[in-house]
Amino acid sequence: MSYIVQFAIGGTILVAASMLSKSKYLFLSGVITLLPIMTLINISLQMKNMSLADFRITQKNAIFGAVGAVVLMTSIFLLTNWLKPLHAVAGAFIIYVFYMMGYMYFISQKITL
C-alpha cells in the first residue's frame, strides 16, 4: 500500500512541476526541475527503512534508472524530429526496454576486478 501512496505522491509532484514550468518544453524542464527534489525525498526514505547493504544495491539501481530516464527522454526528443509523436514514444520505449534488458544482463554477471 505504501508503494501506491509513494507512486501517487511522486506522480503528483511530477505533474505539478511540469505544469508550473515556463519553458517551451514543459515536460522536459519539469522533469529536470523535479529530479533533485525527488532524489532528496527518496534518499531520506531509503536511509530510514533500509540496511546499509540494501541501500547500496538501491543506490546502484538508482544510477542506472536515472540514466534510463535520460535515455528515454532523449530518445523521445530526438525521434520526434523524424517520426510522429506516437511512433517516437513507442520507438523510445523500445530503446528503453533494450537498455533495461542490457542492465539486467549486466547485473546478472559476476564481475570481479
Image (cartoon, grey):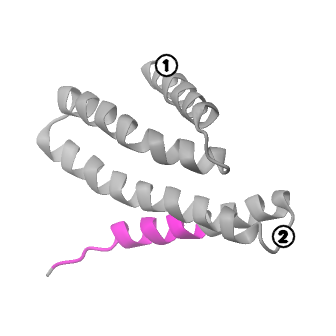
Q: Is residue 93 magenta?
A: no
Q: Position of residue 62 (x, y in %)?
A: 35, 51
| Left or right, residue 10 beside residue 54 | right
Q: Position of residue 89 (x, y in %)?
A: 74, 59
Other residues around mark 1 within 10 Å, as few (<14) / some (14–19) / many (≥20): few
Taking the view exactly as shown, the residue that stands out farthest to the bottom is: 113
Identify the element where label 1 is drawn: helix
Q: Is residue 56 above or below residue 109?
A: above
Q: Is the C terminus in the top left, top right, bottom left or bottom right quadrant?
A: bottom left
| Left or right, residue 108 beside residue 83 | left
Q: Position of residue 67 (x, y in %)?
A: 43, 62
Q: Which mark is residue 5?
A: 1
* Residue plotted at (74% across, 67% down): 91
Task: Tell me where the magenta segment starts and ends, as one range.
Answer: 98-112
Q: Are marks 2 and 1 in contact (CB under 8 Å)?
A: no
| Left or right, residue 72 beside residue 38 | right
CA distance separating discs 2 and 1: 36 Å
Amino acid carrying label 2: it is Leu
Q: Is residue 27 above or below residue 11?
A: below
Q: Nearer the viewer, residue 12 or 28?
A: 28
Amino acid carrying label 1: it is Val
Frontmost of labels 2 and 1 is 2
Quick one: label 2 or label 1, which is nearer the N terminus?
A: 1
Q: Which mark is residue 83?
A: 2
